[in-house]
Image (cartoon, grey):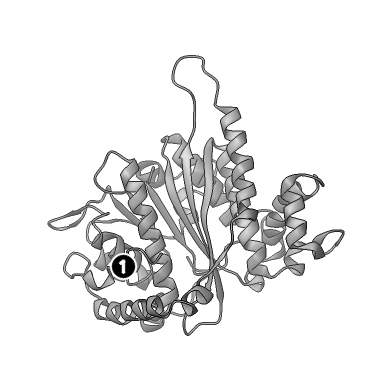
Amino acid sequence: MSAGAPSYSVQLDREAFNNPEKWYVRHIWRQIAERRAQKIPKDHIKLLTLPGVECFDIRLLNEYGLIKTTASGFDPDGLAFCEEVPERFTRISNLLPNARRFRGTYESLIGVGRASYTGTADRWFPFDVINLDFSGPGFKQPDRSTSKTAEALLKTFRLQKAKKGSFSFFLTLPADPYMNDVSGKSELEKCLRDNLHQNENDFSQLFYSKYPQIRGNSRPAYKTMHYSDFLLITVPKIIIKYGSTEWFRVECTKKMTYVGEGHTTRMVSFCFECEYIGLLEGYGKSPRMDELKKGYVQNVMKIMIEPNLDINTYLDSRKETRKELSRIRDEARELFGKRLNESSATALRTLQNAC
């Protein structure tokens, strides 16, 4: 997803998503997708993604047998993507024969700003894995009181709930405060302050022990903390909150940050497991409210307890892993422009245990 109508360069687009740090994140996604595949009765996952012009995430998952293919391409019920930029949309469509495709933003696909879902979203959902790998600002919509991304996240849970679909959810955003307007940042700030105003709860005590400069400070937390730290706490918290309101037990299993090789923008990346709780079996049974509340408290606390993974620092301490990821980056260049059903991506298979 992009913020507007950017100037387009195929080569810059390819290289932007082809670096060791990003390949490390993709192998995390692959491991989580493998675990999700073990939970479902089908042989393959159903994936919705924002793939980028070379579809690297799809190439990797396909190489591990997680996406269903046919003699002519992909099973349309197993793979779908969104892309707004016309040239990117055409290139991606050519690489993914028979995949479901939507020309527009993810927000447009699911019907942000309208009362109902789009007919396309209603036909396509649910998915086993949803990968929102945003390249533009996540929480920015100056002409509205809420951001499109925030509404899109909530509506994603509502669509999955309508089909009673548990799923794994990946979200990646740039950690640049200047990309996000005040209304978007304030929405995340409010989600944080809702807990902190309950002064002596476990969350607030742990938060203030890590960020003592926030206590009693009238300045917004996003102006006082490192912005990436702010997002690494508030984004999982708001997603856990949204999921809980729609009867999902949501756990943030990975919180990562990195600057891709050759780039300057710090990214934050999250992995969530979203299990639909719903109603107990049988007529007249009430929702499993106690289970949901208990899971909400535990998983919000886990945001503060579990450490963030700085991928750059991690790879600097593991030279062989970085070397292998650099090899993948180089080998991936050989796949540029090749259809996924006509080229082998065996070179991308590695890091079985390194992640």
Residue ID at (60%, 50%): 302
The quarter of the rendered structure image containing the C terminus is bottom left
The answer to whether residue 189 of the structure is visible from this angle is: yes
Of the residues shown, which amino acid type is indicated by label 1?
Answer: Ile
Residue 99: x and y in percent read: 27, 56
Disc 1 packing (10 Å; few <14; some 14–19; many ≥20):
many
Residue ID at (61%, 44%): 241
Quadrant hosting residue 255 = bottom right
The answer to whether residue 141 of the structure is visible from this angle is: no
Relative to 199, is 52 above or below? below
Residue 260: x and y in percent read: 48, 78
Relative to 22, is 242 above or below? above
Q: Determine which residue is flagged by label 1.
A: 92
Residue 27: x and y in percent read: 37, 64
Residue 128: x and y in percent read: 37, 46
Left or right, residue 27 beside residue 150? left
Left or right, residue 338 beside residue 21? left
Q: How many marks?
A: 1
